[in-house]
Image (cartoon, helix red, strand yellow):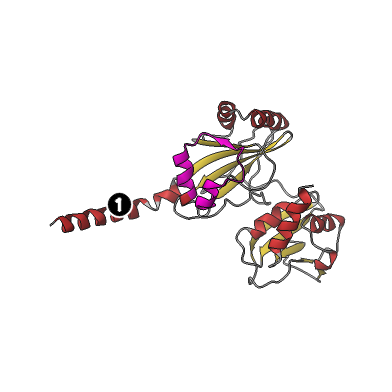
């Protein structure tokens, strides 16, 4: 009899969990992350579903005054000021301050128990309890992707840092028309490594470069990262190639591409080497 009651109770628990599972993606944990030091300060909104789905990261534009204020908050590691600062951009139950400029996120955001016990950013501060960090470490299956803003996504309206920002499921407001003469570039993942195209897009974009889109290539078997262009090899493209550590030989000039872009970057299986070399260059 006891066995039957236990079985029934267990089945009820399973049914309840199954019923609430979809809600974990519809009502994710919302975090505000302030990261950097001095004048190199960035802010991010992180939306973290706890059902194994992809974490959403959105860069938050900061005004010069907000960058200065953010640098002071991070330098002082002042949690109360960080909470107050986050209210300029929305309502966040969780705030995290990371007073370093190195890439990545605190270990409990996606690196499991290993990151929980051996955090690579020990100076980070937040309003989480240790149980919250443990819960996030168990439920986030991978590090949040690095944010980037492509043409066609939304940007902040000058004078209003929160206007126009998109959130999952919202209707984005398109960017202004691209600057005349800017090179339109598409980034495609040809290696199968999660977020490889987004990582490259963040580093390719710059003066004279408009990132039109990111996505998957026709296959994931490209051994090397290549750049296909029908616009010759202008200075902006040369500089973008140098930023991601490619040699000029990686650029292939072809007669034409799809009409909406001037160049396509296909990220190959050398992506991990490119990323490692990029980090080594920027440590010095």
When the figure is inspected, residue 208 is found, relative to residue 64, above or below; the finding is below
Splitting the image into 4 quarters, where does residue 256 fall? Answer: bottom right
**Residue 64 location in percent, x, y?**
73, 32
Label 1, on which residue?
Answer: 16
Tell me the element at label 1.
helix
Residue extending furthest toward the left: 1
Q: Depth check: 281 or 41 in front?
A: 281
Image height of 195 relative to 79, above or below: below
Residue 90 appears in which quarter of the rendering? Answer: top right
159 displayed left or right of 47: right
Question: Looking at the image, which residue is at 63% across and 50% down?
Answer: 146
Does residue 23 sit above or below 129 in this rendering?
below
Q: Is residue 148 magenta?
A: no
Would residue 175 be found to the left or right of residue 244 on screen? Answer: left
Between residue 256 and residue 270, name the one nearer to us: 270
Q: Is residue 270 something that shows in the picture?
A: yes
Task: Say which residue appears at 57% left-offset and 35% top-offset.
Answer: 125
**Magenta extent:** 110-137
Decide if residue 49 is in sight here. Answer: no
Using a 10 Å C-alpha cutoff, classify the residue at mark 1 as few (fewer than 14 neighbours), some (14 to 19) or many (20 or more): few
Q: Nearer the viewer, residue 139 or 55?
A: 139
Q: Residue at 66% across / 43% down in the picture?
A: 155
Image x and y of residue 84, in percent: 57, 27
The answer to which of 109 and 211 lies nearer the viewer is: 109
Q: Residue furthest toward the front?
A: 118
User: x and y percent of residue 152 in the render?
Assistant: 65, 51
**Residue 254, located in which quarter of the rendered image?**
bottom right
| Residue 278: percent from left, percent from top | 75, 54
* Image quadrant where one finds the N terminus: bottom left
Q: How many marks?
A: 1
Tell me if residue 117 comes above or below residue 197 in the rendering: above
């Amino acid at each position: 009899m006891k066995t039957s009651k236990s079985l029934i109770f267990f089945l009820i628990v399973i049914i309840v969990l199954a019923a609430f599972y979809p809600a974990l993606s519809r009502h994710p944990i919302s975090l505000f992350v302030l990261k950097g030091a001095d004048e190199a300060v960035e802010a991010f909104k992180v939306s973290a579903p706890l059902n194994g789905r992809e974490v959403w990261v959105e860069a938050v534009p900061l005004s010069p005054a907000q960058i200065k204020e953010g640098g002071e908050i991070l330098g002082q590691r002042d949690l109360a000021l960080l909470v107050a600062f986050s209210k300029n951009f929305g309502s966040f139950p969780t705030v995290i301050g990371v007073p370093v400029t190195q890439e990545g996120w605190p270990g409990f955001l996606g690196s499991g128990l290993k990151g929980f016990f051996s955090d690579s950013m020990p100076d980070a501060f937040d309003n989480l309890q240790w149980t919250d960090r443990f819960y996030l470490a168990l439920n986030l299956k991978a590090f949040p992707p690095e944010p980037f803003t492509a043409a066609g996504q939304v940007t902040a309206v000058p004078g209003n840092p929160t206007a126009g920002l998109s959130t999952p499921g919202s209707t984005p407001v398109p960017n202004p028309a691209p600057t005349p003469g800017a090179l339109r570039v598409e980034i495609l993942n040809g290696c199968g490594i999660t977020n490889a195209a987004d990582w490259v897009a963040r580093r390719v974009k710059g003066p004279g470069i408009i990132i039109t889109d990111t996505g998957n290539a026709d296959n994931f078997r490209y051994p090397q990262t290549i750049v296909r262009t029908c616009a010759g090899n202008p200075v902006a493209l040369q500089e973008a190639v140098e930023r991601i550590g490619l040699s000029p030989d990686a650029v292939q000039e072809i007669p034409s591409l799809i009409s909406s872009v001037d160049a396509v970057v296909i990220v190959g299986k050398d992506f991990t080497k490119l990323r490692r070399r990029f980090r080594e260059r920027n440590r010095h």
